[in-house]
């Protein structure tokens, strides 16, 4: 799952730019998964919002509707693991859906939801990932330890992942 829907109060240009970047991230992540031999699917146009944005705006009723719709869709599709590059979707699916929805399906989805970096580091522990990538390399990378990773005590998985390459 990629949950890259964005809402930008500055207007359509900002949203288009955000979505263009999100699509590049999704394609790059798919390439990494393919190289690691991971079978995966992408919801694509079937993907709907996790409801995170509307919940932050205070609309609990719409959040409940969106959360129920997405949880039902994931269950109907037989999704067994969710890996997302979106920290907001990750937090919502892993931490908020199980408590808010309270269903066994939502609890199971929460247990099997992973941040992309977290998932790749787990895969690397099982079997070393191919870390040889063609293209530009950089001597210095600015790394931001995302707030969600600190709050969830996930550890610096994205930093560890960068160190592999």
Image (tube, rainbow, N blue to C red):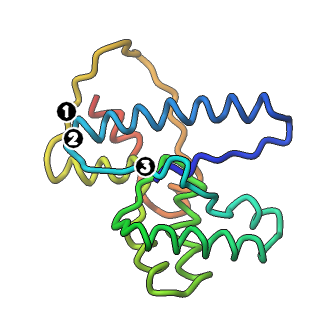
Q: Residues within 10 Å of mark 3 (few under 14, many from 20)?
A: few
Position above or below: 130 against 107? above
In front: 163, or 120? 120
The residue that label 3 is drawn on is 42
- Which residue sits furthest top? 136
In front: 138, or 47? 47
Circles 1, 2 touching at the beta carbon (< 8 Å):
yes
Q: CA distance from mark 1 to mark 3?
A: 22 Å
In the image: residue 90, left or right of residue 68: left
Place residue 151 in its image quadrant: bottom right
Which x, y percent locates residue 81?
A: 35, 63
In the image: residue 40, left or right of residue 24: left
Q: Which mark is residue 130?
A: 1
**Label 1 vs label 2, nearer the camera:** 2
Which x, y percent locates residue 9?
A: 85, 42
Q: CA distance from mark 1 to mark 2?
A: 7 Å
Position above or below: 138 against 110? above
Who's the residue at 28% across and 28% down the image?
A: 165
Please tell me how many numbered marks the rendered image carries. Answer: 3
Circles 1, 3 touching at the beta carbon (< 8 Å):
no
The residue that label 2 is drawn on is 36
**Label 2 vs label 3, nearer the camera:** 3
- Which residue sits furthest left? 127
Compare marks 1 and 2 and give the one earlier in the sequence: 2
User: In terms of secondary structure, where does tag 1 sit?
Assistant: loop
In the image: residue 86, left or right of residue 139: right
User: In terms of secondary structure, where does tag 2 sit?
Assistant: loop
Who's the residue at 69% across and 76% down the image?
A: 64
Which x, y percent locates residue 79?
A: 38, 65
Compare marks 1 and 3 and give the one earlier in the sequence: 3
Position above or below: 45 against 14? below
Which x, y percent locates residue 47?
A: 55, 54
């Amino acid at each position: 799952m990629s949950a890259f829907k964005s809402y930008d109060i500055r207007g359509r240009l900002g949203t288009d730019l955000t979505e263009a970047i999100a699509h590049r991230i999704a394609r790059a992540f798919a390439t990494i998964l393919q190289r690691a031999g991971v079978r995966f699917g992408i919801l694509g146009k079937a993907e709907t919002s996790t409801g995170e944005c509307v919940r932050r705006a205070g609309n609990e009723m719409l959040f409940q509707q969106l959360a129920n719709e997405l949880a039902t869709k994931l269950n109907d599709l037989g999704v067994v693991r969710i890996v997302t590059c979106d920290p907001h979707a990750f937090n919502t699916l892993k931490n908020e859906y199980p408590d808010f929805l309270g269903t066994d399906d939502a609890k199971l989805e929460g247990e099997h939801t992973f941040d992309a970096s977290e998932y790749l580091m787990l895969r690397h522990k099982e079997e070393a990932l191919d870390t040889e990538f063609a293209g530009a390399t950089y001597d210095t990378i600015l790394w931001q330890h995302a707030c969600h990773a600190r709050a969830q005590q996930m550890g610096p998985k994205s930093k560890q992942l960068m160190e592999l390459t």
